[in-house]
Amino acid sequence: MTQHNHDLPDTGPYDAEASSLAGHVDDSVMAELLSIRSSIDNIDATLVYLLAERFKATQKVGFLKAKHRLPAGDPGREAAQIARLRRLAEDAHLDPAFAEKFLNFIIGEVIRHHEAIAEDHQSSLK
């Protein structure tokens, strides 16, 4: 039986059973595939909400840094976070190189946001 994401907010038209495999594989295989994909969909939704919360927190950091004219990046903090995430990834049996790439992408976005916040803050002081 296929589970659906009933607890998630409506995000518009999404067909959880969309697949180019439909009609090409046994119905029982398709049902199992859709069940597993339902779990993946739930995880993906959770990741989006977790990232949103993370960026809300880093935005607060950005405002604090702008107010006190601190640099957007903090290489010491970033290196420590990357090392920590690599250890967590190893413990979780996730490729540490992938985890590092993922965190570097997030850090890059955070720094970009902090730079924009600082620029806006400086403009408002003029």
Image (spheres, helix red, strand yellow):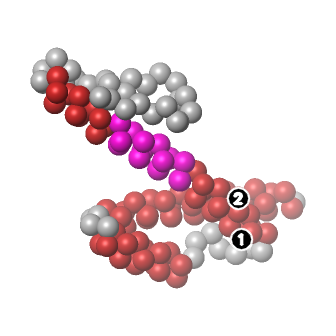
Give the distance between the C-alpha atoms of the residues marked 2 and 1, in whole angstroms: 9 Å
Specify the segment rendered in magenta.
Answer: 38-51
Q: Residues within 10 Å of mark 1 (few under 14, many from 20)?
A: some
Q: Nearer the viewer, residue 38 or 65?
A: 38
Q: Quadrant of the C terminus?
A: bottom right
Residue 86 visible in the picture = no
Residue 43 magenta: yes
- Please tell me in which quadrant of the rendered image residue 18 appears: top left
**Picture mark count:** 2
Q: Is residue 56 above or below residue 27?
A: below
Q: Amino acid at mark 1?
A: Lys
Image location of residue 75, percent across then percent down: 52, 78
The residue at 47%/43% (across/down) is: 45
- Secondary structure mostly seen in magenta is helix
Asked whether residue 32 appears in the rendered view, the answer is yes
Q: Amino acid at mark 2?
A: Ile
Q: Does 25 sit left or right of 84 as displayed?
A: left
- Location of mark 2 (residue): 117
Q: Nearer the viewer, residue 122 or 3?
A: 3
Find residue 102 and report its horizontal and vertical position in percent: 40, 60
Q: Earlier in the sequence, mark 2 or mark 1?
A: 1
Q: Are marks 2 and 1 in contact (CB under 8 Å)?
A: yes
Q: Which residue is mark 1?
A: 65
> In the rendered image, which quarter contains the N terminus?
top left
Tell me which residue sits at (16%, 27%) in the image: 28
